[in-house]
Amino acid sequence: MAAIHTYSRSGAGRLAALLASLLLAACGGGGGGGGGAPSDGGSTTPPPVTSPGGTEPKPTRDQAFRFLTQATFGPTEAEIQSVMTLGYGPWLDQQFAKPTVSHRALWDAADARIRAADPTPGAGQREVLDGFYAQALSGEDQLRQRTVFALSQVFVISMQGSEVGDNARGVAGYLDMLGANAFGNYRTLLEQVARHPMMGIYLSHLRNQKENPATGRVPDENFAREVMQLFSIGLVKLNADGTARKDAAGKALETYAGEDISGLAKVFTGWSWYGPDTSDARFWGSSKSQDADRQWQPMQAYAQFHSASEKRFLGQTVAAQTGAAASLKTALDALAGHPNVAPFIARQLIQRLVTSNPSPAYVQRAAAAFGAGGDMRALLRAVLLDDEARKSETAADPAFGKLREPVLRLTALLRAFGAKSDSGSYLIGATDDPGTQLGQTPLRAPSVFNFYRPGFVPPNSLMAAQGLAAPEMQITHETSIVGYANYLRSAVDRGFGQSGLDGKATRRDVQPDYTQALTLAPQPSALVDEVSQRMLGPQANAAFKRELQTAVESVAVPALKADGSNKAQVDTALRNRVLVAVLLSAVSPEFVVQK
Amino acid sequence: MHSIYPSQASRREFLRRAGAYSALGAAGPMALNLAALGTAAAQSGGDYKALVCIFMYGGNDAYNMVLATDTPSWTNYLAVRQQGSDAIALAAPGTAVNAAAAAGSPTRLGGVLGLSPLNAQGRGFALHPVMVGARDLFAAGRLAVLPNIGPLVRPLSKADYRNSSIARPPKLFSHNDQQSTWQTGAVEGATVGWGGRMGDLLASNNGSALFTSISTSGNAVWLAGREVMQYQVSSQGAIRVGGSGNSLFGSTVVQDKLRGLMRTARSNDLLARDHAAVAARSMDAEVLLSGALPAAGTAPFGTPGLVSGAADPLLQYDNPLTGAKATNGLAQQLQVVARMIASRQTLGVKRQVFFVSLGGFDTHDGQNRQQADLMARLSHAMSYFDTATQGLGVGSQVTTFTASDFGRTFTSNGDGTDHGWGSHHFVMGGAVKGRDLYGAFPVYGLSDGKGDFSSPQQIGNGAMLPQTSIDQLGATLGQWFGLSAGQALELFPNLVNFDASRRSLGFF
């Protein structure tokens, strides 16, 4: 793992102020110059697929809680009130219009602060994660950031492995790029993914050379293969509802063959670092030819390295001598225009936000909203407002929902208790280790196949007996379950992440605010109601609350002596009651599963 | 894919299975205790066998792991791979190390390490320059090479391959699907692997089903049987929920409730119940294992008397990129395997399947450095584990084999290789008739300039067309493990398509 830096502290709260000042300032910067600007904010809004508001009743508290579990990094009291007041659809409209903070600007600010104290180290991976958690925990544009996290698990790059990890500023830029396109258009998103230098490094099409018939060297096929398998059309032909198309013998029809990959690989030759010229030295990344923004600016074409031969793929033929830009356009138009894209992308968005096994009809409705134009905003609206996502009858089905992944459990817990960062930087850091941490860190998947696969079926499980997928179960095992519980056992008490920017603060950086719960700690049933309501919402069933109350009551609180001499013991006992309620809620199946 | 509204019939089936499952998963192991297991073990005597799968995630470039060094092969190897500024052709046997060359470059690594097999098939062979440990194991007769092995439905000639109507495995060249195919015979989504099935059929005498099928590296479908369930153990052994001690936040009740809440679902929700079942298994196994596992710092698998926190030199390999010692995560995984094998009598187990893994083999670029480091880890870990199992007196009762998504292309893309099909692999152990190759080594040809190759065993971009199937490997391992010929045919349904005389590869 690459070095995780600590650095000197330079004034608590400064970054929080900076974060606010960066609002809008860097909007769209991550998208860079690769084609049209992403259409956000004030652009036209397509009509909702259902008609929320109006004659429909406003969401109840439980309904708002459930909706926010799907659409954000975790419900907060303020957002619950907002959804109850506005209704689902208007809340989404408000989210679509929210200004956003640039991850790269946050990273640059951290880098500048570090270098002001010591010019050598600079910011690294840690600061990318700081930005992620700052926005997940305190950002206003929750839907956009939550969608960015979902998209980062479809269009995967990973800081595991030094190639991408050593270009942390580029990873921050990648998050901005996903954010700039999260409510935009799939075709633009696909192009900006394809041309992003971090994707170029991760799937090795950056610096990919044309074939050399004399020596037998062939283009690198890595990106050509995965852009089809993972980012656009998948391996098998799909019906509009996401089910596989089969031949007469019942065999699924494959979408492409080896020749399509070889042909498409030629399209992705001759792309490399952004810069003011297209010299060989810049293509190779020579230290004398490195633009300051090359880590995030879209890759540019170098004609001398681009294959000039005929390129055949997916029924398309790009004539010999066609240049890199025109070849890319043909390729991406072919991929984005493929009928598989809508159900393929729609189903994965549903799985990331709502449920692991959507009905084909639900997939079809979401895919129809996405449409031939690849409207991401309409897709999100359809995914979140569909009856299957919203109806409590559906949620009551034993097979509905998804395992909440560890990172989202963490953010939900912290948001439920209004956690604040002492440094303002949210120093939670990497949590890779399944034995002592979460077994998952944003942007650190083990491979381009993400932390888990959309089609993973856990062996010997009730889900498997029903033929159902449970992607997040792929990172769930006897070790990870204990690691998660033990990580929280320590963290709910002492806080989360490292102790200050310099590692020398008196307590860990991110601290939940238990004030309200502490006032109720003398009355176990009230405390249990408060904590389970904040963390579980409608999932807080009576049987669970009885167990929790027994546990809370078992922490004896001595009577406060008249002279106050035992106040410290009383306070400790009251706080322990709160910690018990929070920890036991966080490890309960009721919290771990999102209904 | 699947409706969330199952039919009434499938609901009934689900309820039936759910009942059986919860009895097995939650209540079952609780009824066991260590003393009872020990009694069972004492009666079982020395009948113990284990299979260990070392999975190389990403698709290992076997062309640079096992090399053909006879003149025709080597000439073509150089013609195909010796090109560009970061060429991926390794140096010929006997080439001296150039200490001034860039880290990980072929001249810095020196020549490939020659092998002297008992039957050389008229060819010459060598291993990657950093694989000193594997070379020595081969020479000592404890390691064999399985050339050009991969998934097949039936034997396939190149002419057959060109005929799309002749059956072949689906979704070739796709990482996730071929990982699954190696482990289960089917693409992603399969839930039963042949390691787990061997557990189903052969481990019924195990005192605890919990410890039949063990992964040290996350979930691996190879280990899942119809009844047998994978148990995942960390390299440090089992971990206790809530940490040490019986009290949590000043209360013993809290510790009990923590565990109780985690292991019980208070609803009919499938995921909640599945998650709770894993938690229950984790807790039950920890109780048993914590009392049974010998400490890591115990010979022969560890170094006694180390200062707390010090790295065990047995687990350190020579990093070829830095020249320094570094901890080998694969050896750490194999250490906990050795510790579990050491506790086999206490745990009352007679047949075990283990899965360990190493990632990073998808060397599309930067292959020289990346693969050198991985080959060094693999070789060191195999050598470490062979020594440990011999030290435990089970050297001939443990058989280890390598597997990977797929092999890679013979052609170079400048500094790396792309997805292939067939690949060379290793099988190791005292029961293995080592220092030999089992299966015909493929001819290494040249490109025809249109993507095809002159060799009858190489297809587009020089990917190997497998001549030995995973089913043959599995059947050979399985019969050593105790499968009958009929059971082998049941576990490996494509085996019937192979000539009866070739269903066992003959390395035992």
Image (cartoon, helix red, strand yellow):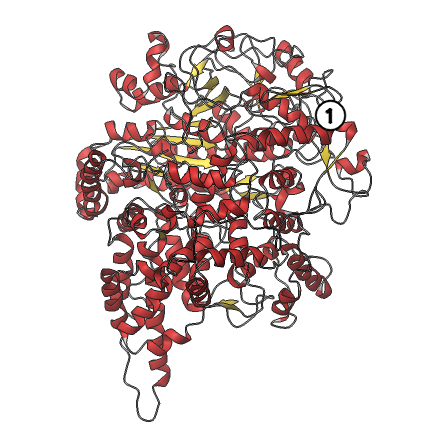
> Is A561 left, or right, of A362 in this rendering?
left
Is residue A31 in sight in this rendering?
yes
Q: Residue furthest front?
A: A55
Pick whichever, A441 or A307, lies toward us. Answer: A307
Q: Is residue A228 above or below residue B69?
A: below
Q: Position of residue B382 (x, y in %)?
A: 46, 32
Residue B487 rendering spot, x and y as whole percentages: 26, 19
Check the image and report above or below for B454 versus B423: above
Expressed as whole percent of the image width and height from the top left, the position of residue A271 reads 71, 34
* Left or right: A112 as drawn, with respect to B410: right
The answer to whether residue B300 of the structure is visible from this angle is no
Return the x and y of residue B465 as percentages of the image width and height. Answer: 51, 14
Circle 1 marks a residue in which chain? B
Amino acid, disc 1: Gly
Please name the residue shown 47% across and 43% down the image. Answer: A349
Residue pointed to by mark 1:
B84
